């Protein structure tokens, strides 16, 4: 009997000390508590107007595992805050076109959680996504900031959004 209780205590401690998921996993408890006011502020249609790499203007970035970051300039994004769905479309004439439904949210730590869905795919089936910091939110603009590793150094990739007319 004592041995059974001891095993149960060890099992409880093991599961209670489980390490946090990696930042690429979007099925974490981070997405359970949301920053609703910021989500409502982002509701609507947006155009990604610039991509920059402060202090590292000569790097090439493959954004969201889809295309060169410069291909995202001019892309259109739609965010629906009441159901955390939306869409994005790459429209640059010098790049391959791409469009996809998305699922997004902003957790209470200011992290933008993004899942890019394939046609007909349900968001709950997509385990991986992207975590970006939300910054500079105004009525007409905001930024998403990604961190990438370049030669062992962490660099920012800043995506600048403007509200579409």
Image (tube, helix red, strand yellow):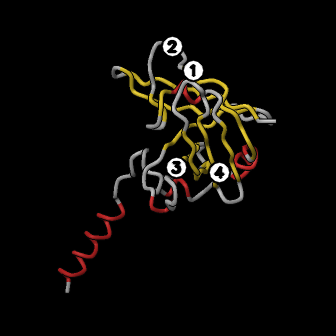
In contact (CB < 8 Å): disc 1 and disc 2: yes
Ranked by sequence position, the earlier of labels 4 and 2 is 2
Q: Which residue is mark 4?
A: 86
In contact (CB < 8 Å): disc 3 and disc 2: no
Ranked by sequence position, the earlier of labels 3 and 2 is 2
Q: Which mark is residue 52?
A: 1
Q: Residue at x 72, y 43 (%)?
A: 42
- Report the Cα–Cα distance between label 1 and label 3: 22 Å
In contact (CB < 8 Å): disc 4 and disc 2: no
Q: Which mark is residue 115?
A: 3
Q: Which residue is mark 2?
A: 57
Left or right: residue 85 compared with residue 30? right
Left or right: residue 13 compared with residue 24? left
Image quarter in which the N terminus is found:
bottom left
Ranked by sequence position, the earlier of labels 4 and 3 is 4
Q: What secondary structure is found at the residue carrying circle 4?
A: strand
Image quarter in which the C terminus is found:
top right
- Report the Cα–Cα distance between label 4 and label 2: 30 Å
Of residues 93 and 144, the one nearer the viewer is 93
């Amino acid at each position: 009997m004592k041995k059974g209780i001891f095993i149960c205590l060890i099992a409880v401690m093991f599961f209670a000390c489980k390490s946090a998921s990696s930042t690429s996993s979007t099925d974490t408890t981070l997405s359970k508590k949301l920053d609703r006011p910021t989500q409502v502020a982002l509701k609507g249609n947006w155009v990604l107007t610039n991509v920059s790499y402060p202090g590292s203007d000569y790097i090439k970035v493959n954004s969201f595992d889809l295309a060169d970051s410069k291909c995202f300039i001019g892309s259109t994004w739609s965010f629906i805050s009441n159901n955390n769905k939306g869409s994005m479309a790459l429209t640059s004439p010098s790049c391959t076109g791409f469009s996809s439904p998305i699922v997004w949210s902003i957790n209470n730590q200011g992290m933008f959680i993004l899942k890019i869905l394939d046609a007909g795919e349900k968001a709950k089936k997509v385990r991986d996504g992207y975590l970006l910091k939300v910054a500079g939110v105004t009525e007409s603009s905001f930024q998403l900031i990604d961190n990438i590793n370049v030669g062992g150094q962490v660099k920012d990739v800043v995506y600048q959004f403007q509200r579409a007319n």
